[in-house]
């Protein structure tokens, strides 16, 4: 039986997912399962880890495909028998900041929700039953301050709606999983220099994932059902 903490990360081939996978894989007693739609895209991450004397497992995962999610679940169940950490990182930004909600194509909203909400739900439904066997289950959903109802503005409406909905998923899962000792939280990593955030963003991916890793490694008395930025709670 694998004694290390088993962490699954979606969308780990670039940006925040890659940074989180690298950080966790270099921590003692952690086994990272890095996933991507094209596993070949994980090669640079694997090479970087090998240079530092570390490694991880890789597996294909398209969060929009039932068969892909099911195959990941079955592979993990057969090989490890449990999941300790799930980081729902895979996400898309398909509408521009200048897009008005009155001009938002419904197909754009549907495609955004398919990845940012339904994808996270699909993966959670598949893997959380395996997390019940964990001694310290942790789920981290990569949300955004752009999804805060308390500070909601115009611009990128599909993305905003998807992240607000993801926060609702966090609250529901946190309540349902409490009896199993599984902690579920949302995190806003801030504006980071990734393919999604752009080159003008003030934060590096490594800075952005600090709170992600913190929530993934919470102690038993850590919070659940919260929304965090820089390790501090923020309004929903």
Image: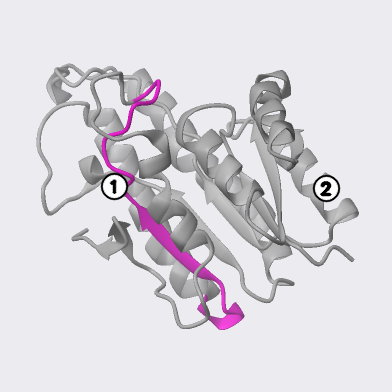
Pointer 1 residue: 164
- The quarter of the rendered structure image containing the N terminus is bottom right
Residue 119 higher or lower than 38, as above or below: below
Q: Earlier in the sequence, mark 1 or mark 2?
A: 2
Magenta span has 184?
A: yes
Residue 15 higher or lower than 222, as above or below: above
Residue 171 higher or lower than 196, as above or below: below
Q: Residue at x 35, y 33 (%)?
A: 204
Q: Give the range drawn in magenta.
A: 178-196
- The quarter of the rendered structure image containing the C terminus is bottom left
Q: Residue at x 65, y 47 (%)?
A: 25
Q: Which residue is drawn at 58% across and 34% down?
A: 12
Q: Residue at x 31, y 48 (%)?
A: 188
Pointer 2 residue: 74
Percent of width and height locating residue 232 = 26, 64
Magenta span has 7?
A: no
Give the left or right position of residue 29, taking residue 163 as reference.
Answer: right
Give the left or right position of residue 79, taking residue 4 as reference.
Answer: right
- Which element carries disc 1, helix, strand or loop? helix
Q: Distance between the residues labelled 1 and 2?
A: 30 Å
Q: Residue furthest front?
A: 52
Local crowd size for mark 2, using a 10 Å CA cut-off: few (<14), some (14–19), many (≥20):
some
Percent of width and height locating residue 54 = 73, 43
Residue 137 higher or lower than 155, as above or below: below
Q: In which quarter of the image is residue 182?
A: bottom right
Q: Quadrant of residue 116?
A: top left
Percent of width and height locating residue 27 = 63, 55
């Amino acid at each position: 039986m694998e004694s290390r903490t088993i962490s699954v990360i979606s969308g780990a081939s670039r940006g925040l997912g890659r940074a989180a996978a690298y950080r966790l894989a270099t921590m003692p007693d952690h086994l990272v399962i890095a996933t991507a739609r094209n596993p070949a895209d994980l090669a640079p991450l694997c090479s970087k880890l090998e240079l530092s004397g570390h490694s991880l497992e890789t597996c294909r995962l398209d969060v929009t495909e039932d068969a892909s999610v099911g195959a990941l679940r079955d592979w993990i169940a057969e090989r490890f028998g449990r999941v300790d950490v799930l980081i729902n990182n895979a996400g898309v930004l398909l509408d521009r900041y200048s897009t008005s909600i009155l001009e938002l194509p419904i197909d754009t909203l549907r495609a955004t929700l398919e990845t940012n909400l339904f994808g996270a739900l699909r993966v959670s439904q598949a893997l959380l039953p395996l997390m019940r066997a964990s001694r310290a289950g942790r789920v981290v959903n990569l949300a955004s301050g752009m999804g805060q109802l308390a500070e909601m503005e115009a611009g990128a409406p599909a993305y905003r709606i998807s992240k607000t909905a993801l926060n609702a998923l966090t609250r529901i899962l946190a309540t349902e999983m409490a009896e199993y000792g599984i902690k579920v939280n949302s995190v806003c990593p801030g504006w980071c220099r990734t393919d999604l955030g752009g080159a003008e963003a003030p934060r590096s991916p490594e800075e952005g994932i600090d709170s992600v890793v913190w929530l993934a490694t919470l102690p038993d008395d850590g919070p659940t059902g919260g929304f965090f930025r820089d390790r501090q709670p923020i309004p929903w």
